[in-house]
Structure formats: structure tokens, C-alpha cells
Image (tube, rainbow, N blue to C red):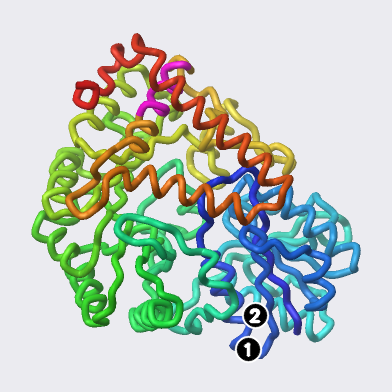
Amino acid sequence: MRILLINPATVGYSRSVTTPLGLLSIASSLQSKGHKVRLYDRTVEKVKAEKVFDEFRPELVGVSLVSFKSVYDALEMSEYAKKLSLPVVWGGPLASEIPETVLKKGCIDLVSIGEGEATWIELAEKFLNGERNFESVAGIAFRNEEGKTVITEARNFVDLGELPPIDWSLVDVPKYFQSSYECEKMLYLYCAKGCPHSCTFCYNKDFHRCTYRKRPLEHVLDEIGYLVKNHGMDGVYFADEMWGRNRSEMRMICDSLRSLDLEFVWGCQTRIGVFTEEDFKYMYDSGCRWVFFGVESGSENMLQKMNKRIPYDKIEETFSNCRKAGIIAIGSFIVGFPGETVDDVAKTVNLIEKIETPLVNLNYFALVPGSDIYYKLIEEGRYHEITDLSEVADIRPIERNEYRFTDVPEIDLKVIRSWYMWRSFSAKSLSEDTKDFSFAKKVATDAIKQLKRSKLKDFIISMFLSGTEFLSIVYYSHFYPSVKKKYGIGKKYDK
């Protein structure tokens, strides 16, 4: 069967795109069963949809909905497919959490809920054989003849060792290269799926059911070897929600990476308190140059509400140990969380100042469908269940505070976020191994690459949005000294 899998374009996005790992895995699985697959990634491809459909002649179309910013293009592609009388299936984290809302659109026939590899193989066989009874297919949603939404039983997770290795010939690899710390051609790969934890703001509890599963390490190593030797990849960002759960697992991966004897560096995301200074040095010696830590708040009260379950007394020590090992430590924080107070925000600022990392990823709270806090706010009558895709299509939680679930003044949140974005952008030195202003250069390079990929209309929109966002950051970070003084922002860096 000829199957077209679409990664829809995003609106006003100036940052470099990442490899569509979920679609790549599904496409590789379908190909292993004899299906012909075309992965059409509209975030990097300029070719028009009409040409792709005409040349490939698909019999089944899949659309991945990961981000709010993809909704408009996902609908446009689905409506085009329906004009050609093609069946359309949506999947991805966002679609999986609001299947009934998605199915209200007449251009969508089915929703694949959760992990899609096994589901897609079963659906493809159904369509290939002309069957239209889907009730026996686990992990999907559809509308029956009466117009009622049917959600089948949850599908059991597959053994990741049974999935075929990812076929990177399905995409134009160089289009996904990013500059990063000490590398110019970095790609996103992954060693494992899921996370054993259940933070209240994350969709993991619904989507991955707090289940952590490893891929065969040899598959990961083979991918790295192929991408380095055939495409010149010089950096890897392991996209695992939690990389290296413990010391023994970390050392096994590091030893394996070192055994490849290839020139590349890498980074990952892991938890506070898992590794010591000695461990970080071990990681550095195998090529690790940056680590992302999801701290989220400096208030123990808020961390409890978030169900972060990280050792608070290990936060400063972890950042210090990472820095001593020569690794760039990136701290992620959230402001505007429901119930957060001025005192909670002040504690977050105080912690950020203490850990002394030049790179802080500070975001406004984003309400994610499927998260515990999403259901809690609905139950409390402070939010409503999403019933129309138009409600989420224009949400931009990274750029602006979409919600008002806290009494902290809006201007305070803007100034705090803008200051730390500016501080990260203008940081001269990140580590002894990086060049001066390497983060600013990375941001600028990513933006230019993404703008070059855009069509003229999208290019103009992206330029306007990027420029507006940059000026907003400069304005709020420099022209509200009273707010900075109120929270003790930038004492060290203002000297």
C-alpha cells in the first residue's frame, strides 16, 4: 500500500526543526512490512502538496499533530487529501489527547492514539484489504455510523527491540542539521521512550503511561555510525525524556559511544541528583558537552504541586558538578503555574541566581491536554475541556502567557522571562570548550536556516514575529528595573 505520512508546517516558528522521530519510526515499521512510504515533512520541504500527491499517488494519508502551531497546516493537508477521496488518519501527542475534538472535523477519519508503529501496521492491512470495521483495532478513535465517537481499548506497548532500525533514507538528513555547543551538524536521536515519572504538567502519564522502555543500544549505535560516516553528523541530542536512569546505565551507554571511535559530541536531558561530579566527568570523556535539567521551580511548595520529586538539596550541587566536569548545564524553569505566588517566583529567581548557569530556559506555564493539571483545572471550573481545534490553533505558550492561573502580576512574569532569555542570548562564555557568544550564534544560525526553508509569505511572517519577539525581550529585560529589583534579578550579572 502507498502511504503518505505528513509532518505539517508550523506557524511563525523561527527555531530549527527537529527530526520527526515518531514518523520516521512508523514509516520504517510500515516499510518493513512491504508498504511503500513517503514521509512529507512540510517543516523542511518547499515542494508543494499538489506535486507530492500527484507523484506519489497515496492510498492512505497520515498526519502527525505534535504542536499547537501545526493545527492549521494539518487541517489544510487533511482537507486536500479528502478532496481526493483519501482516508486520513491523525496521530501524535496532541491528537491522542483530544481525539473526539479532532474527529469533529470531517476531513479526519481516524485518530491513532499513543504510540503508532503497531497501530499503523494493523490499519494499513485493514485499508489494503478493503475493510472498514475498525472496532477490533486497539489504540484508535473513530466515528461510527451514528456519528458517535468510538475509542477502542488502549494498545499494549510494543517491545522496542522488535521494531526495525530507523531508515534515514526516508528524509533528507542535512535539512535537519543544527548548530549546537561544539558542533555544527547536530541531529536528534533517541535511546528510549517514555518516562517513569508523573509531573502534573506533562502528558506523559496519559501518553506513555509512566512507562520507560529502552531501544536496543546496537540500533542507536548503528544509526550514529551511519549518520556520521554518510552525512557528516558531528553532534547528537538524545531526545529521551529521561536519559540514563542510573550510574550503571549511564556508563554502559558512554562506553558504547566511546567504542565507536567517531568524532562527535552529544547532549541529553536527565534528572537532578542522579549523577555525581565523577559521573559527569565520565560523560564528558565520552563526548557529552551539554545536559538539560528540568528543575521547573525554586519553590519546594510548587515542586510538590508539580509532583517533580527531585531532591531539592541536590539542585545546586548537580549544576556545580556538571560545570566542574566541563559540561554546559542548562536549567529549565516554569513561571505562571496555577497557584504560584510572588514568593514562589522569587524563590525560583533566587535559585537561578545561585546555580549560576549562563543558560536558562524559562517558559510560561503551558496547559497541556492530557496532563493532571489540565483535568484538575477543568474539575475546579477554572478551565474547560477543549471541544474545537480552533481553541488550540492560536495558542503560543512559548512566546506569551496564554493563561491567568496565578495572581503574580503579568508584567513581573514578562520581565523575569525576558531577562533570562536575554542573559542566555548574550552570555559570552558557556564553558572552556565553547567559543565566545556561542549561544547567540546558535540562535541566529538556527533562525536563518529556518527562514531560508520558508516560502516567501511564511518568511515575511516569521521575520516579523522573530523581530517582534526579540524587541520585546530587549524591552522587558532592560526597562523595568523596579521589577528586577523586586525579585533580586541579575545581581551577579549586572556587575
Mark yes or no: residue 101 visible.
Answer: no
- Front residue of this view, candidates 241 and 236: 236
Query: Which residue is at a point 16% across and 54% down the rendered structure image?
Result: 326
Query: Which residue is at a point 24% across and 50% down the rendered structure image?
Result: 328
- Helix, strand, or loop for circle 2? helix
Q: As displayed, is residue 447 above or below residue 195? A: above
- Front residue of this view, candidates 3 and 388: 3
Residue 133 lies within the magenta run = no
Q: Which residue is mark 1?
A: 33
Query: Which residue is at a point 44% across and 20% down the rendered structure image?
Result: 476
Judged by its main secondary structure, the magenta piece is: helix
Look at the image and give the residue range highlighted in magenta: 411-419
Circles 1 and 2: CB distance less than 8 Å?
Answer: yes
Badge 1 amino acid: Lys
Q: Which residue is mark 2?
A: 121
Crowding around mark 2 (Cα neighbors within 10 Å: few <14, some 14 to 19, many 20+) is some
Badge 2 amino acid: Ile
Q: Position of residue 401 (x, y in %)?
A: 53, 28
Residue 92: quadrant of the picture: bottom right
Toward the left, the furthest residue is 278
Q: Position of residue 399 (x, y in %)?
A: 53, 34
Q: As displayed, is residue 286 above or below residue 305? A: below
